Amino acid sequence: MLLDAKFRPINEEFFAASVTPEQLDLLLSDGWRHFGPHFFRYNLGIYENEIRLVLPLRIRLGDFKLSKSQRRVLRRNADAEVHFGPVTLASETLDLFERHKRRFKAGVPSSIHDFLAREAEPVEVLELNVRREGSLIAASFFDIGETSISSIYGIFDPDETAGSLGIFTMLCEIDYAIAQGKAHYYHGYAYEGGSFYDYKKRFSALEVYDWRGRWLPFEDSPHNRGNYSP
């Protein structure tokens, strides 16, 4: 990846015991994320031995439309039971996390607490549970801001791959955010160029942060063409 000489690498972090919903919105809009009390942002990452530009992504919920493939995901999971509530991390959720992480060959998380605080979260976090015939098959966790929500992490039963449950939980979070009148859904980082995280780019009304304080429509941004000129 070729970068302009004016490009400024960013690698910042801080720890906070409490953040208001309004403060969370501001942090998210400036490229920050968090796992528990650890808030961080960085604009370069290493993927498959290459230095890649990191792309914070969000969806304008007022303009969001389901794609044909996303509609199929919803139909395939029409029999699932979906429940939103406070984070409980019940034993069945921890068991599901252990099964889910076996999917990874690299960067395998050691604990659900790599993503969630062991004690109190600095912001309001909700847990989404998805059940089929009473069994927990997927779960996800997301922050609640004043005008936005932000996905933290999702897990699913690796034996249930036909249901595209990772996409399903994201669509459930989007639906929840729209019902709550939120303006934006932040669903994490991806990389410029092709990567494992490209599924995050396959949503309508997608915006990408340019690391200069601007959110650009993804379809019009240089990141969508594989070029970058900061």
Image (cartoon, rainbow, N blue to C red):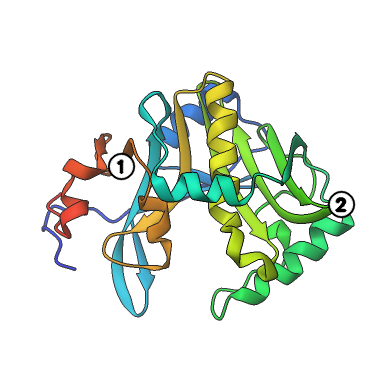
> Where, by quadrant of the figure, is residue 64 drawn?
top left
Element carrying mark 1? strand
Q: How far across and how far down the image is residue 41, in percent?
A: 43, 49
| Residue found at x 54% / y 42% | 171
Q: Amino acid at mark 1?
A: Tyr
Which residue is at the front of the view, 103 or 10?
103
Q: Which mark is residue 209?
A: 1
| Residue found at x 14% / y 58% | 227
| Residue 110 visible to an observer of this rendering | no
Which residue is at the front of the view, 187 or 175?
175
Element carrying mark 2? loop
Q: Amino acid at mark 2?
A: Ala
Q: Is residue 189 above or below residue 186?
A: below
> Where, by quadrant of the figure, is residue 18 drawn?
top right
Q: Of tags 1 and 2, which is closer to the observer?
A: 2
Q: Is residue 72 above or below residue 144?
A: below
Tags 1 and 2 touching, CB below 8 Å: no
Q: How far across and how far down the image is residue 216, in percent?
A: 24, 37
| Residue found at x 68% / y 37% | 125
Left or right of residue 227, residue 26 in this image: right
Q: Which mark is residue 90?
A: 2
